[in-house]
Amino acid sequence: MPTTPFRKIELGEIAESHHPVLVLVRHGQSQWNKENRFTGWIDVDLSEKGVDECTNAAEKLADISFQVGYTSKLLRAARSLELITGRIGIIPVVKSEALNERHYGDLQGMNKDEARERFGAEQIHRWRRGFADRPPNGESLEDTCMRTIPFFESEIVRDIELGRNVLVVAHGNSLRAIVMHLEGLSRESIIQVEIPTAAPICYTVK
């Protein structure tokens, strides 16, 4: 559990909150999301749909005054944050590999359907959704948690404790790690959690 307790809220509740808010956003659809490829740390750009998704996310967040933004070192997340803040207001940005997507190792660049044919659907499902299962030369979700959560606690929580509204634009698995931490989810529960592209998830301090 986080050192500072959080509770999940709806976007519409933020205006009534008297506490700092944390908003998590997965990047917009990438070109390889569109092509159904394992992306991981490969640096691909957003698709046209992804750009539109970020524009829509910015409209939803337009009434929130953020003081700082966090993102990964990967283009699709950094550009998503840039597109959002370009519409709602430029803010200081911190980029860190700690927020990078889970590294998919030998699966990176491979079409997911082709991977199922090669390795079997059950094995691909375990690699994608199992907590401790690693694809060859890649990371598990557990590995991702081990680099993401310490950064979240030392950097992002510090800003929130200073009274700042924080926007984090990152990736499906680095955000799953944060959600698991914030909500105290079990290993079994987090397997069921999906983070949609460019859909804000909001928390405030309890």
Image (cartoon, grey):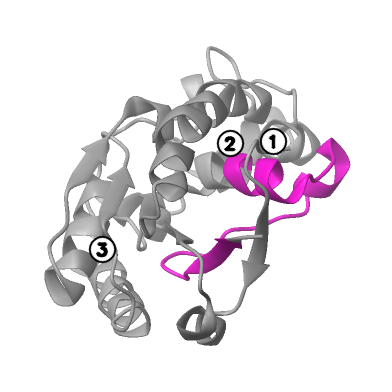
Residue 149 visible here: yes
- Whether the residues at callouts 1 and 2 have beta carbons within 8 Å, the answer is yes
Along the viewing direction, whichever of 177 and 172 lies nearer the viewer: 177
- Return the residue at label 2: 115
The CA span between labels 3 and 1 is 25 Å
**Residue lying at 39% horizontally and 52% vertically, measured from the top left:** 168
Instruction: Identify the image quadrant of residue 144.
Output: top right
Residue extending farthest top? 137
Q: Nearer the viewer, mark 3 or mark 1?
A: 3
- Return the residue at label 1: 124
Quadrant of image for the N terminus: top right
Residue 182: in magenta span: yes
The CA span between labels 3 and 2 is 22 Å
From the top left corner, tell me how far across and down residue 203 is, in percent: 57, 63
**Residue lying at 32% horizontally and 82% vertically, measured from the top left:** 56
**Residue lying at 73% horizontally and 51% vertically, measured from the top left:** 183
Along the viewing direction, whichever of 35 and 59 lies nearer the viewer: 59
The amino acid beneath tag 1 is: Ile
The CA span between labels 1 and 2 is 7 Å
Instruction: Identify the image quadrant of residue 187.
Output: top right
The amino acid beneath tag 3 is: Ser
| Disc 2 residue crowd, few under 14, some 14–19, many 20+, Cα 10 Å | some
**Residue lying at 66% horizontally and 60% vertically, measured from the top left:** 206
Along the viewing direction, whichever of 69 and 147 lies nearer the viewer: 69
From the top left corner, tell me how far across and down residue 158 is, in percent: 43, 38
Instruction: Report whether 114 appears left or right of 75.
Output: right
- Return the residue at label 3: 47
N-terminal-most mark, 1 or 2: 2
Indicate the secondary structure of the residue bearing disc 3.
Answer: loop
Indicate the secondary structure of the residue bearing disc 1.
Answer: helix
From the top left corner, tell me how far across and down residue 160 is, in percent: 44, 49
